[in-house]
Image (cartoon, helix red, strand yellow):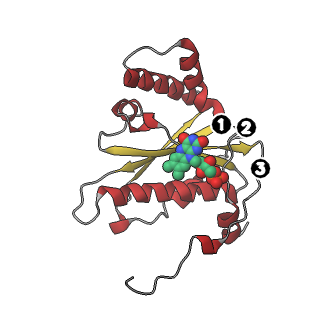
Amino acid sequence: MDALTALHTRSSANILTEPAPTARQLDNIIKAALRACDHRSLKPWKFLLIDGNARQKFGELMVNVKSSADGKELEPNLAAKIKSKPMRAPTIIAVVAAIQEHEKVPTIEQVLSAGAAAQMMMVAAHAQGLGAIWRSGSMMFRREMLEGLGLAPTDQIVGFVYLGTPKVVKPIPIVDVSEFLERWDGIQ
Ligand SMILES: Cc1cc2nc3c(=O)[nH]c(=O)nc-3n(C[C@H](O)[C@H](O)[C@H](O)COP(=O)(O)O)c2cc1C
């Protein structure tokens, strides 16, 4: 698939099954992430691969984080639902902005760079025929989640890229570029 086709046809896949991305496909995905725009080349990124049994442990971590956010033990049904969330794909990559103190590059630019890395991963997955979806949730903003993933308190999770084989391929909506692009030609 050529680059413009990949960029123009990427879509998210909610349901992802085996086979998981191969080591080579994962390598290509991370290589693409590492070409995200990056002010002053800080490389303010960390990527955590969560697959196999680690997904169960990640589910348990999600339950613990939610329970600590709610200040109580979760009802068994809710706990089971949350615990199973990481099983929605064979492979997950947590995308993290590893924020550095920098006089010229504020936190927002580093978070944007990590977001750009996540988007590059999404397109690299699609270009290789994989399915992917970028997921988030309030839990990723909690200190307990950073701790559970072994991240630094200054890190910020920008999302979880779920990867696998798509069950359904969504049709791509037709877009009218002119709805989003307007020419600005001077002070109004
Ligand atoms: C920062 C961010 C967080 C997101 N979090 C979720 C999420 O938690 N759950 C979800 O279903 N979609 C989430 N999405 C949206 C999907 O990744 C996806 O973009 C959306 O479903 C639209 O589908 P499309 O990418 O095929 O246009 C998020 C997107 C972004 C950019």
Q: Where residue 54 sits: x, y (%)?
A: 54, 29
Residue visible at 24% across and 55% down in the picture = 101
In this rendering, the answer to whether 118 lies above or below 41 is above
Q: For this rendering, which residue is in front, 137 or 153? A: 137
Q: Where residue 39 sits: x, y (%)?
A: 36, 67
User: In the figure, is residue 185 to the left or right of 163?
Assistant: left
- Quadrant of res 82: top right
Badge 1: residue crowd in 10 Å (few <14, some 14–19, many ≥20): many
In this rendering, the answer to whether 177 lies above or below 155 is below
- Residue type, numbered disc 2: Glu
Q: Which residue is mark 2?
A: 18
Dot 2 or dot 1: first in sequence order is: 2
Q: Are marks 2 and 1 in contact (CB under 8 Å)?
A: yes
Say which quadrant the C terminus sits in: bottom left
- Quadrant of res 150: top left
Q: Which residue is mark 1?
A: 90
Q: For this rendering, which residue is in front, 137 or 49? A: 137
Q: Secondary structure at mark 2?
A: loop
Whether disc 3's CB lies below 8 Å from ligand 1 is answered no
Q: Which residue is mark 3?
A: 169
